Amino acid sequence: MGNTAAKRQMNQRYAPELSLPKAAESRGPAAWAAPLSVAIVAVLVYLITLHGTFIYDDAWVILKNWRVTHDWGKIWTTPYALRGPDRLWRPLTLLTFAIEYRIHGATAWPYHLINIVLHAGVSVAVVALGRKLAGLRAGWIAGVLFAVHPVHVEAVAGIVGRAELMCTLATLVGLWLFLKPPSGRRVVGICACFLVAVLTKEQGMLFPLLLLAVLPFRDTYPKDSQARRIDTLLLAALLLLFSGYFAWREMHIGFYWNRETLNPIANPMVLSLGRDRWLMPLVLLGRYTGLLVAPARLSPDYGSSIIGSVARLDDPWLWLGVAALVAWFVLAGIAMRRKAWAMLFCLLALGLTYGLTGNIVALIGTIFAERVLYLPSAFFLLLVGMWLGRWRLGFAVPLVIAAAALGAVRTFTYAREWNDAAGFYVWSYEHQPRSFNMYVMAYNEHKERGDWRAARQDAYRGREALPDQGDLHQMAIDADVALGDTKAAAESYALGKREAPKYPFDFAPPREMTNSPAVPRTAPSTQGGP
């Protein structure tokens, strides 16, 4: 009896989620006030995006995508991004865009409104799952921090970030349903959540593994009970659905794609060899950890020469990644020893959802992107909520309010930048001078608006920051020609040949240089973009 009492006391001290009173989950005004307050906060910080437009990949995925605008049927048998080397398949995400396009066409604000509502729903789902795992206080802390975390801006303010929002919402709701007493209706709900998750983003394939990871936290029941039979039905249904998903996707899209076709501009790790191939994921882990803890500097692009392909031993991001990995193993060991299953589940879920996008086992289409943290950050913040939830209110509440306020201000100011495409691209390359994609996006946006002077400025600044990129020199040549500045075009051509000699420049030099008419061979280039 004495040993049992001691163990119970230790569990209450180190893992209060194991002794949470059931009444705290369902009764009292806090049960509805907590998720409601989180939803309101999530909506308020992103209302500014209703003034936004189609930005970055939005136009290519929605407005210039004939499957969305004309042929819905092809959504189910073609890759998500027709121009991308990686065979992504997100038919349900594209279907939502197609339905909206049929209703309101190219009007941007309804797309943004749906994203805001989805983000509010995900924030509420974080509260609900946290309440099941560790109590209402931990769930509310995690939910409010999730609602305002600046790393989520790309997923919410960018319309195509809906893939992240829908996959995360379906995953968290599915986990919440799985933790409730088994029933036939919940089997249907969990299977529906799985289908939504897996048909909106590839991380949805982890859904069954996440259910398995949270299994130790569920209430136990007799082996011969009806609940066991319901769980068997759930397992059979998930296996059937996953097999159907796998077969359909392999038949029409395929899973394999050649990583060697990756553009080093998007993922420089395709150039990483030997030691660098194994150390670079630690560099990325360090950068992602930095964004989760202190998201001060944000950007829509980290490709090209920003991160690079070589891991330097004097790089602080490398050692922060090592520290994060060691901390994960230490915390997992502590959770196992103390049987803190909620903590262990969040650690496993964080590792699984991040690992799929961390360029660890296989390269993905991008080296680094803030949007891929949307789902993993939910489990990270649940861990934070569990930790702060154990503090006394006098210490925890001011800290949470301060962190939420700082996050809300940073989120609002960054989300506001996404409202104007050209201004956002210029802002982005000013804050990330080695971002090749942002120079190209700014150039193309200004060119479409007919503002060739601004486009030339983008090209000039780009070639100054990345002189070895022939595309930027070609853009400068094209802008000079469009402005009728033949002398500047000849100078840009000479500079390009000197800085990027292997690039096949498309320009006919002036008469005095070649004894030929001073005209370009083609119209200004339209190449570039993500």
Image (cartoon, helix red, strand yellow):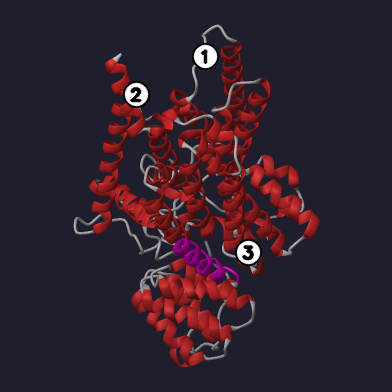
Q: Is residue 489 visible?
A: yes
Task: Rate crowding at label 1 as few (under 14), some (14 to 19) or many (20 or more) other CA atoms within 10 Å.
Answer: few
Q: Quadrant of residue 346?
A: top left
- According to the picture, the residue beneath numbered tag 3 turns out to be 47
* CA gap, disc 3 and disc 2: 47 Å
Residue contact between numbered discs 1 and 2, judged by CB atoms under 8 Å: no
Viewer-proximal residue, 396 or 444?
A: 396
Q: Nearer the viewer, mark 1 or mark 2?
A: 2
Q: Residue furthest left?
A: 314
- Residue closer to the observer: 17 or 437: 17
Measured in 3D between alpha carbons, the distance from the residue under mark 1 to the one under mark 3, in whole angstroms, is 46 Å
The vertical placement of 321 against 198, above or below, is below
Mark 1 sits on what residue? 221
Label 2, residues with CA under 10 Å away: few <14, some 14-19, many ≥20 = some
Q: Position of residue 519 (x, y in %)?
A: 56, 85
Marks 3, 2: nearer the viewer: 2
Does dot 3 land on a helix, a strand or a loop? helix
Span highlighted in magenta in the image? 405-419
- The quarter in which the N terminus is drawn is top left
The disc label shown at residue 8, or none: 2
Toward the top, the furthest residue is 224
Taking depth in this image into account, of 475 and 388 the one nearest to the observer is: 388
Which x, y percent locates residue 29? Answer: 61, 43
